[in-house]
Image (spheres, rainbow, N blue to C red):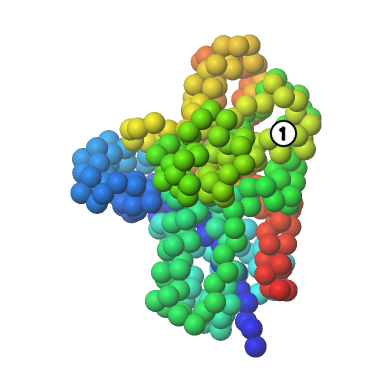
Amino acid sequence: MRNGGVLLVNIGSPASPAVGDVRGYLREFLMDRRVLDMPWPVRTAIVYLGILPWRFRRAAEAYQKVWTPEGAPLVVISRRVQVALGQRLSVPTELAMRYGQPSISAAVRRLCAHGIDDLLLIPMFPHYARASYETAVVRAREVIARQAPRMRLTVQPPFYDQPDYLAALVASLRPSLEAGYDHLLFSFHGLPERQLRKADPTRRHCLRRPDCCERDSPAQATCYRAQCLRTAEATAAQAGVANGRWSVAFQSRFGGGSWLKPYTGAEVQRLAQGGIRRLIVICPAFVVDCLETLEEIGLRTRADFRAAGGGELVAVPCLNDQPRWLEALERMARAFLES
């Protein structure tokens, strides 16, 4: 008889905001070849000589600003989602992080202890990217092949355009829109442009022309930028936000090279200098509030907006454990469990 279960995987967080824990977390994260996609010697030199010596202390300070008594917001909220979803499904539902704890290995062991032999993996990343969705899937496959080779694995595809996900985004956005606004900014996590080109199976579509994301292509199945734009367009349309009153930008850059543009910092400054006084910022690439939404957007970007002449920046909370999002996750899981 089939014994089904669900595994939610997010990116992860340091065990604490202490400098040593943050350094260890960043080392694990940055040494992943899908995150810093360079040959090992180059990656090692960049991480140990160019990033860690200066970035980890600043990151530790940022984590300290958003840390809660229960722990890292990303992990704490993800736990709430896991518990709520498990109660809705009445099947073993586990949570793991790609980096740090709880680990994928530990989650698979717990699922095995429940006798699970048919598993749905839901990467908590709406859009495909090698540095998020793909690395989580690859790691889960490696762990299951080693620890539970007879377990069947089904992977939830990126859900950037699924009606339930979009409906949850609109529901989260609605209160801020109804309170009045001048402009809505969709801020997605940034990505090096070279990673889009590497993910392009045709090798001749992504970033080859300005309107590449508007043209149908097999490349869009793995094109992070195209999927982000689809999410923004659909959300704005369903929320009734007129063209010209919303825009898209990309945040959270690190390292050199050319990243997806426009950058959130530059876009926020442009909007402030253009007379925008009440700016709403939503971050659809993150389904759970984390350092990038709470500290980068909620604190630093808000301060930058005001310094550039803007007024109020409203940071929309992520989907977290909101009912509409839990319903969306439940439907994903039930489609698997009842198939």
Q: Say which residue appears at 69% left-offset and 21% top-offset.
A: 244
Q: How far from the left and from the top, in percent, is residue 323?
A: 74, 53
Vertical placement of residue 239 versus 287, above or below? above
Q: How far from the left and from the top, in percent, is residue 307?
A: 51, 15
Q: Is residue 78 visible?
A: no
Q: Say which residue appears at 20% left-offset and 49% top-offset.
A: 41
Check the picture and name the quadrant holding the C terminus.
bottom right
Q: Say which residue appears at 75% left-offset and 46% top-offset.
A: 167
Camera-nearest residue between 238 and 61: 238
Query: In which quadrant of the rendered view does residue 188 lie?
Result: top right
Which residue is disc 1 drawn over?
236
Q: How far from the left and from the top, in percent, is residue 74?
A: 52, 50
Q: How many marks?
A: 1
Vertical placement of residue 112 versus 250, above or below? below
Camera-nearest residue between 245 and 301: 245
Q: Is 249 positioned to the left or the right of 16 in the image?
A: right
Camera-nearest residue between 14 and 337: 337
- Kind of residue at badge 1: Ala
Q: Is 144 positioned to the left or the right of 156 in the image?
A: left
Regarding mark 1 in the picture, which secondary structure is present there? helix
Q: Say which residue appears at 48% left-offset and 34% top-offset.
A: 207
Q: How far from the left and from the top, in percent, is residue 28?
A: 33, 54
